[in-house]
Amino acid sequence: MRLFFYVFAILGLSYSIHLKGQDTITLLGGNVIVAKVTSVDSINVNYSIQKKKGLKDKFVASEMVFDIKYENGSVDTLYYKSEELDHYLTPDEMYLFILGEQDAKADYHPKMTAVLGVVVGAGLGYLLRDGFYVAGVPLVYTIGAGVSKIDIKNINQRSTTILSHPAYQEGYIKVARSKKAFNALAGSLIGTVIGVGIGKSLDQ
């Protein structure tokens, strides 16, 4: 029992030391990479990440990185406003844009879009099963869902200042529309196949 305690303590200590030595790379798409940054230049951010078989060296293009938060507390912001790079937001605005992306990725789950897609797809698939237009049912439903209103879910209790900022809303809506369109396509495609299948079986 005592041996088990010592082994557990050593593993826990080594794990905490490993975590403490990690840096955080925030990408413009909202994703975060937790790793050890080894070098940074105008082209790439090189880092080492822990895998099952040991450390693996990887890199990401510097123009895709917003900032790097080092384990010592310092922050290196790589993003800057540039028409050449299509970076039309200021660093402060991009921070809010990324915050919107991250909130939408974590909190926006358009399940009803998929459910309604199955229902609509099944109904139209059944009615249009013998026509050429049945193939366009998922596309039309997806387009309709993609342009519909997006309600921002304030699960993280963001301030009114953040929620009302155009950059935050733009980032949130960008991710939310993508997720909604995917659910719409998947749901309506499944529904259409079901509707056509039911219709064909009844026609026999």
Image (tube, helix red, strand yellow):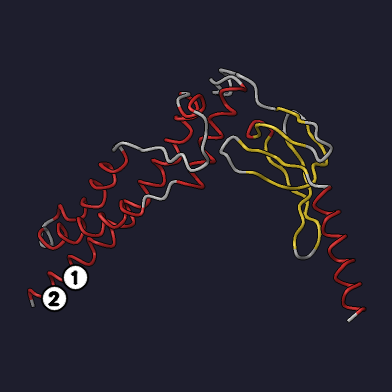
**Residue at 31% in and 36% down:** 149
The one nearer the camera, 45 or 17, is 17
Secondary structure, mark 2, is helix
Coordinates of residue 194 in the picture (x, y in percent): 22, 67
Q: Amino acid at mark 1?
A: Gly
Dot 2 corresponds to which residue? 201
Above or below — where is 45 with respect to 108? above
How far is disc 1 from disc 2 in space, using C-alphas?
A: 6 Å
Above or below — where is 62 with respect to 56? above
Dot 1 corresponds to which residue? 197
Left of 43 or right of it: where is 54?
A: right
- Could you classify mark 2 by the number of other residues whose Cα lies within 10 Å: few (under 14), some (14-19), or many (20 or more)? few
Outermost residue, bottom direction? 1
**Residue at 88% in and 82% down:** 1
Dividing the picture into quarters, in which one does residue 61 lie?
top right
Dividing the picture into quarters, in which one does residue 111 lie?
bottom left
Dividing the picture into quarters, in which one does residue 164 lie?
top left
Coordinates of residue 168 in the picture (x, y in percent): 49, 29
**Residue at 79% in and 49% down:** 48
The one nearer the camera, 82 or 154, is 154
Left of 25 or right of it: where is 204?
A: left
Q: Amino acid at mark 2?
A: Ser
Residue 66, numbered label = none
The answer to whether the residue labelled 1 contacts the one labelled 2, judged by CB atoms less than 8 Å apart, is yes
Above or below — where is 143 with respect to 19? above
**Residue at 48% in and 27% down:** 160
- Could you classify mark 1 by the number of other residues whose Cα lies within 10 Å: few (under 14), some (14-19), or many (20 or more)? some
